[in-house]
């Protein structure tokens, strides 16, 4: 069924590469008008040109940048239907080695940036011509459930669950038809991971073993979940967590 996002306006943060790029491509294919929001101007602009989207530079940790994006959406598109809060970084520092600067930078992007994205989306979606309505989708991780040594990343992705639930119930209790859900990818075969595998082939087998299904997920599979949550098909879903991780968080380790 094509055209599941026909006539919808969507913003995808972190849309220049990886899962974000996959979401941009799928949304455009389904009829959405998409703004690719990223700090990577070269890759972001290239993705936008290929997909028929528009690129806008966005530092998600900046309140001023979000305000500018909101004004652009109002001026150029008139309304917003979908916000995909996907931008994020990793640090690879555990609790014994992480410094405050690294911690603060990661949380400012992965969690504060997502909060600002939700806040901006709600303000725009409340102004929609047909009444307050829209879908916010926050990219979390399988590490929202199961920790890894990267302490700031794990903390940020666990925080996304609380943020998502709080946004969902706040909007619902206020009578706003604005939904908020999170998606939780596991090991996903992005272009960055493909490069790592080319340099160290043993990485592929290790990543495949992370899920009971015995393989990594694809960018397209994660994008399909984002599409469902962005579309009207998920109209009764809010405050939910939607894993796309091949059962990784469901199976207890075996001997």
Image (spheres, rainbow, N blue to C red):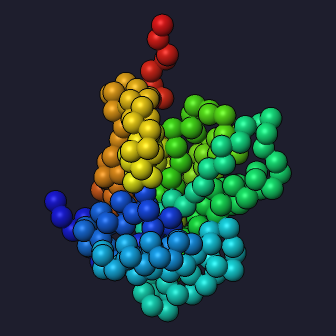
Query: Above or below — where is 162 with respect to 55?
Result: above
Q: Residue at x 62, y 32 (%)?
A: 147
Taking the image as drawn, is residue 206 in sight? Answer: yes
Looking at the image, the residue that sits furthest to the right is: 100
- Quarter residue 167 falls in: bottom right
Q: Is residue 139 left or right of residue 153?
A: left
Looking at the image, the residue that sits furthest to the front is: 199
Residue 136 placement (x, y as % from top left):
49, 61
Residue 34 placement (x, y as % from top left):
38, 75
Looking at the image, the residue that sits furthest to the left is: 1
Quadrant housing the N terminus: bottom left
Closer to the camera in the image, 243 or 52 = 52
- Quarter residue 232 falls in: bottom left
Q: Is residue 198 left or right of residue 117?
A: left
Taking the image as drawn, is residue 242 in sight? Answer: no
Closer to the camera in the image, 197 or 123 = 197
Q: Residue at x 44, y 62 (%)?
A: 17
Q: How many marks?
A: 0
- Quarter residue 131 falls in: bottom left
Query: Above or below — where is 41 with respect to 247?
Result: below
Q: Is residue 88 left or right of residue 230?
A: right
Q: Residue at x 35, y 41 (%)?
A: 217
Residue 157 placement (x, y as % from top left):
61, 46
Looking at the image, the residue that sits furthest to the bottom is: 75
Closer to the camera in the image, 210 or 126 = 210
Closer to the camera in the image, 83 or 17 = 17
Q: Residue at x 51, y 38 (%)?
A: 142
């Amino acid at each position: 069924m094509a055209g599941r996002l026909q006539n919808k306006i969507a913003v995808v943060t972190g849309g220049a590469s990886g899962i974000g790029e996959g979401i941009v491509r799928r949304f455009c294919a389904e009829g959405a008008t998409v703004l690719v929001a990223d700090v990577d101007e070269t890759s972001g602009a290239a993705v936008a040109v290929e997909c028929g989207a528009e690129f806008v530079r966005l530092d998600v940790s900046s309140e001023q940048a979000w305000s500018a994006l909101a004004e652009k959406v109002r001026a150029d598109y008139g309304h917003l239907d979908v916000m995909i809060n996907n931008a994020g970084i990793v640090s690879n520092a555990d609790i014994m080695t992480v410094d405050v600067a690294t911690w603060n930078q990661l949380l400012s992007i992965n969690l504060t940036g997502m909060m600002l994205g939700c806040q901006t989306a709600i303000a725009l979606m409340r102004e929609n011509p047909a009444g307050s309505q829209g879908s916010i989708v926050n990219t979390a991780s399988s590490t929202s459930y199961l920790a890894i040594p990267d302490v700031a990343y794990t903390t940020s992705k666990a925080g996304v669950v609380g943020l998502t639930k709080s946004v969902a119930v706040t909007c619902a209790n206020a009578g706003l038809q604005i939904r908020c859900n999170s998606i939780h990818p596991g090991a996903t075969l992005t272009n960055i991971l493909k490069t790592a595998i080319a340099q160290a082939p043993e990485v592929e087998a290790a990543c495949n073993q992370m899920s009971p299904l015995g393989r990594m997920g694809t960018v397209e599979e994660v994008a399909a979940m984002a599409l469902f949550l962005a579309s009207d098909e998920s109209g009764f879903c809010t405050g939910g967590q939607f894993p796309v991780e091949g059962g990784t968080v469901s199976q207890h380790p075996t001997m």
